[in-house]
Image (spheres, rainbow, N blue to C red):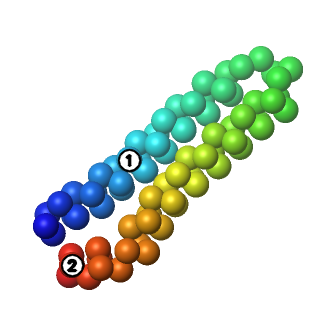
Amino acid sequence: MNNIKLLVIIFVIIEVFVSIFILRDLNRRIDTEIASKVNTITTQKEIIYNNVVNDALSKFQILYTNQNFFKDIN
């Protein structure tokens, strides 16, 4: 059971890092857009960044609020 819980934590951490790399690549692509769309590009980047961060934080919050989950690992 502990192995499964440890795998879940590792999966969430890997997913966060993958999301960050996808976000960095997407930022690079958006930055190559036409300069006349600067305001739109900035807004899109902020929305995407907020979505990725909120998704990652919500996953960690779900794991953290389940105290028994972490007690079983120790």
Q: Is residue 16 above or below residue 21?
A: below
Left/right placement of residue 6 relative to residue 14 reads left
Q: Which residue is mark 2?
A: 72
Q: Is residue 74 shown above or below 14? A: below
Single out the residue that lies furthest toward the top: 34
For residue 51, side relative to residue 13 (left or right)? right
Residue that appears at 38% across and 47% down? 15
Residue type, mark 1 in image: Glu
**Residue 57 location in percent, x, y?**
52, 60
Q: Calculate the distance from the C-alpha at mark 1 to the C-alpha at mark 2.
A: 23 Å
Circle 1 residue: 15
| Residue at figure coordinates x 82%, y 23% from the top left | 37
Instruction: Say whether marks 1 and 2 touch (CB < 8 Å).
Output: no
47 and 33: which is toward the camera: 47
Residue in the image at 44% along x and 65% along y: 62
Quadrant showing the N terminus? bottom left
The amino acid pointed to by label 2 is Asp
Determine the secondary structure under disc 2: helix
Q: Nearer the viewer, residue 48 or 20?
A: 48
Which numbered circle lies on residue 54? none
Earlier along the polypeptide chain: callout 1 or callout 2?
1
- SS category of the residue bearing label 1: helix
Q: Residues within 10 Å of mark 1 (few under 14, many from 20)?
A: some
Sort mark 2 into few (<14), some (14-19) or many (20+) by Cα contacts within 10 Å.
few
State left or right for residue 70 relative to residue 72.
Answer: right
Residue 67 in the image: state x and y as whole percent. 35, 80
The picture quadrant where one finds residue 8 is: bottom left
User: For this rendering, which residue is in front, 63 or 34?
Assistant: 63
Q: Is residue 23 above or below residue 70?
A: above
- Image quadrant of residue 31? top right
Q: Nearer the viewer, mark 1 or mark 2?
A: 2
Q: Tell me where residue 46 appears, x and y as whole percent.
A: 71, 43
